[in-house]
Amino acid sequence: MTGGARDEVERLLDRMAVVEPLVNAVCTLHPDAVGQADLLDREAADGRRRGPLHGRAVLVKDNVDTHDLPTTAGSLALADAPPPSRDADLVARLRRAGMVVLGKTNLSEWANIRDEGSASGWSAFGGLTRNPYALNRSAGGSSSGSGAAVAAGLTAYAVGTETDGSITCPAAFNGCVGIKPTVGTVPTAGVVPISGSQDSPGPMARTVRDAAALLTVLADDGRDLASHAVDGRLAGKRIGVPRTTYWGYSPHADAAAERAVALLAAHGAVIVDATDLPTLEEEVWDDELVVLLAEFRSGVADYLATRAGDVPRTLDELVRFNREHAGTELAHFGQSLFEKALDGPRAGDPAHLDARARSARATREAIDGVLRDHDLDALVTPSYAPAHPIDLVNPETFPGSCSGPTAVAGYPLLTVPTELTAGLPVAVSFWGSAGSEPTLVEVAHGYEVARDASSGPLPEPTFETFV
């Protein structure tokens, strides 16, 4: 029997056969994706559609547990382990909603918590993911494969995870929409952890409405977020522009963001300029690193305890595994963050708790204060500079980004592509307070409509060899 789901899966598999060798976004395909689709088509034919995304295909980042596919976090330490014994909670929600789990996407190994000089988009298990707009350019990290797969037309829906920038960056670099929800909105049970304080799985898609529809499934909290992606909600929204720190690091990104702000104003938003956050001292980012490393050290051991087979059980054992397999695991960069975590405080130690309290308080007061003092619905900033060239020799450099304050605060961030500059995507990100996803969807959809009316959707990638 053929139908909508099978047609979509077969079309995407055909697309992968052509494009996947160029971008290397998908590390594991589901061997029975067509069988899943056939079952869902039979249900639909019998009038038993499970929800609005029934029969749609989704790719899931390879740090999210699937009972029927490997979950490796990009590491050879987990490559030969049996699949997890059960689905992550968020994957169970995808299946209950009638989605076809098409496969797993590559990521920056261990979601980019391994080394300060890492290369985004590379893992020992999955190899190197490339940007569909320019194959010599980074796909960002750590949800590299999820962003590249959406941009390359390998799926309409993908799941990423963010601790600080890991949805926002690949969404911006690959020209797709990404939503990093308020921490706790989407469950992290069955997700390889970095930080219980900051980890937040979320959707990546081509449009704000599609991303909101997927977040509705992932959150499963009674909110229909896609219903907020409707015309007419932008008018009257008060949007702040915090220029200090979060603008000014990339002329290309700034110019595109200025045009985005002008479009927001032309379509009825009230722009409140120079609504700067209080200066966040370097101590905030030092504290963030203390928190991430302490929580990773304990969290990864808890996670590894759930996995069967001959796998490392502690961070010490992971460090040892990497040293024993240095020719592959440490071929391009080291494990300095793993080593720092072993030398630092444990989760629950006073140093960890104090760092978390200070950093959360500083970022939340900064964001909530500017929103409150200027009666704002959201903030808007450039997301990232255009994607940098891939370099497996020298450490990556990022001139600036928008993700830090909302990451530490645990607040949502919604990223929407604006245009191509020098052939590469750039984006803007909308910030809000805890639980403000419906408002951010309204604002971002309104901007997307304005963008499409002005210049059209972002052009499709052409898989240029070099930009």
Image: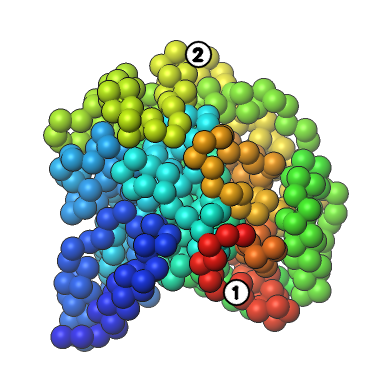
Residue at 59% x, 56% y: name it.
172
Q: Is residue 121 visible?
A: yes
**Category of crowding for the residue at label 2, using alpha-carbon neighbours closer than 10 angstroms: few (below 14), some (14–19), many (at least 20):** few
SS of the residue at dot 2? helix
Where is residue 23 drawn, in percent x and y?
A: 43, 60
Tell me the residue that label 1 is attached to. 459
Dot placed on the residue nearer the N-terminal end, 1 or 2? 2
Quadrant containing the C terminus is bottom right
Q: On screen, 108 above or below 451?
A: above
3D distance between C-alphas at marks 1 and 2: 51 Å
The nearer-to-camera label among 1 and 2 is 1
Pick whichever, 46 or 451, lies toward us: 451
Q: On screen, 57 above or below 336?
A: below
SS of the residue at dot 1? loop
Q: Is residue 211 visible?
A: no
Residue at 54% x, 26% y: name it.
289
Amino acid type of the residue that numbered disc 2 sits on in the rendered structure: Pro
Left or right of 383 in this view: 16: left
Left or right of 71 in this view: 377: right
**Category of crowding for the residue at label 1, using alpha-carbon neighbours closer than 10 angstroms: few (below 14), some (14–19), many (at least 20):** few
Give the numbered dot on residue 350: 2
Left or right of 437 in this view: 302: left
Left or right of 295 in this view: 270: right
Where is residue 431 drawn, in percent x and y?
A: 65, 52
Residue at 65% x, 27% y: name it.
284
Q: Are marks 1 and 2 in contact (CB under 8 Å)?
A: no
Amino acid type of the residue that numbered disc 1 sits on in the rendered structure: Pro
Pick whichever, 335 or 341, lies toward us: 335
Q: On screen, 232 above or below 358?
A: below
Pick whichever, 300 or 436, lies toward us: 300
Where is residue 366 drawn, in percent x and y?
A: 72, 37
